[in-house]
Image (spheres, rainbow, N blue to C red):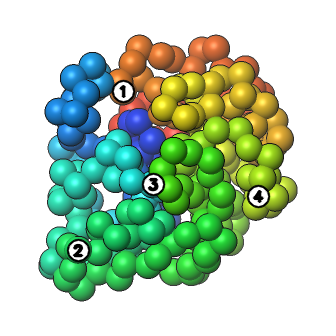
């Protein structure tokens, strides 16, 4: 599986031409609501040419479900499987068209193109936040979504996670680097990738202390 970091919490997974996009934020929508949260990295509009087969949204916050970004991908004429918890599902399905809008709350599973997607618990300020596990039959990838450290989460997570993607920014009801490191050590993935930094702030992951960490660069492939 090839994985590209889209910035903030956005990720693009690709396998044999099958494309999965999670929480893309490719606009400056947040600045309109909160001027201090302006983009530090310019939008790379080349990503708008991508035609995702599956789009996943972990919760209904503007830097994760951004209608301005979504409009480039999900339209009345697209044919995309959209996996979304209820807070997002209620909104995104209004687009209509030929898209398959799947209500993807915690413990829901969906299989497409021999890839299994499982929604797992997240602890966040949205009403129905989720994380997601992507199992391509060879490896399991766990994207936590925005979350705080919560013991209930670990009961949803298998013991053989290959790559873990988690927030470390410590604001907006996300784990800080200390708690994120504790979380990562509990998951014990082969690779750990800290995200949700460097878009609205000047944070880096240099203070994130966890073995087997890969610090991603926006718009570049994450070497796994």
Q: Are marks 4 and 2 in contact (CB under 8 Å)?
A: no
Determine the CA span between mark 1 and mark 3: 18 Å
Place of residue 2 in the rendered image (x, y in percent of width and height, measured from the top left): 51, 53
Residue at 26% from the left image edge and 43% from the top image edge: 26
Place of residue 164 in the rendered image (x, y in percent of width and height, measured from the top left): 66, 45
Determine the CA span between mark 3 and mark 4: 19 Å
Residue at 64% from the left image edge and 14% from the top image edge: 207
Q: Considering only vertical position in the picture, is 56 above or below 196?
A: below
Determine the CA span between mark 1 and mark 4: 28 Å
Q: Earlier in the sequence, mark 2 or mark 3?
A: 3
Q: Earlier in the sequence, mark 1 or mark 4?
A: 4
Q: Considering only vertical position in the picture, is 85 above or below 67?
A: below
Marks counted in the figure total 4
Taking the view exactly as shown, the residue that stands out farthest to the bottom is: 98
Determine the CA span between mark 2 and mark 3: 16 Å
Q: Which of the numbered marks, if any, corresponds to residue 94?
A: 2
Residue designated by label 1: 199
Q: Are marks 1 and 3 in contact (CB under 8 Å)?
A: no
Q: Earlier in the sequence, mark 1 or mark 2?
A: 2
Tag 2's secondary structure? Answer: helix
Determine the CA span between mark 4 and mark 2: 32 Å
Q: Considering only vertical position in the picture, is 40 above or below 163?
A: above
Q: Which of the numbered marks, if any, corresponds to residue 59?
A: 3
Residue at 39% from the left image edge and 18% from the top image edge: 201
Tag 3's secondary structure? Answer: loop
* Left or right of residue 185: residue 32: left
Q: Are marks 2 and 3 in contact (CB under 8 Å)?
A: no
Label 4 neighbour load within 10 Å: few <14, some 14-19, many 20+ = some
Q: Which of the numbered marks, if any, corresponds to residue 157?
A: 4
């Amino acid at each position: 599986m090839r994985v590209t970091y889209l910035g903030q919490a956005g990720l693009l997974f690709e396998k044999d031409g099958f494309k999965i996009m999670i929480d893309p934020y490719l606009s400056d929508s947040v600045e309109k609501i909160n001027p201090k949260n302006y983009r530090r990295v310019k939008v790379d509009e080349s990503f708008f040419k991508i035609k995702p087969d599956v789009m996943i949204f972990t919760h209904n916050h503007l830097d994760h479900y951004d209608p301005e970004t979504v409009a480039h991908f999900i339209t009345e004429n697209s044919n995309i499987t959209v996996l979304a918890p209820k807070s997002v599902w209620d909104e995104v399905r209004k687009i209509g068209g030929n898209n398959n809008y799947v209500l993807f709350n915690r413990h829901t599973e969906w299989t497409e193109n021999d890839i299994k997607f499982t929604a797992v618990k997240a602890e966040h300020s949205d009403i129905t936040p989720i994380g997601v596990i992507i199992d391509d039959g060879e490896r399991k990838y766990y994207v936590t979504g925005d979350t705080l450290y919560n013991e209930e989460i670990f009961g949803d997570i298998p013991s053989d996670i290959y790559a873990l993607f988690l927030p470390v920014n410590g604001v907006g009801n996300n784990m800080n680097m200390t708690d994120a490191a504790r979380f990562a050590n509990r998951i014990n993935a082969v690779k750990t990738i800290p995200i949700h930094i460097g878009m609205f702030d000047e944070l880096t992951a240099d203070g994130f202390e966890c073995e087997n960490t890969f610090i991603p660069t926006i718009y570049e492939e994450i070497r796994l």
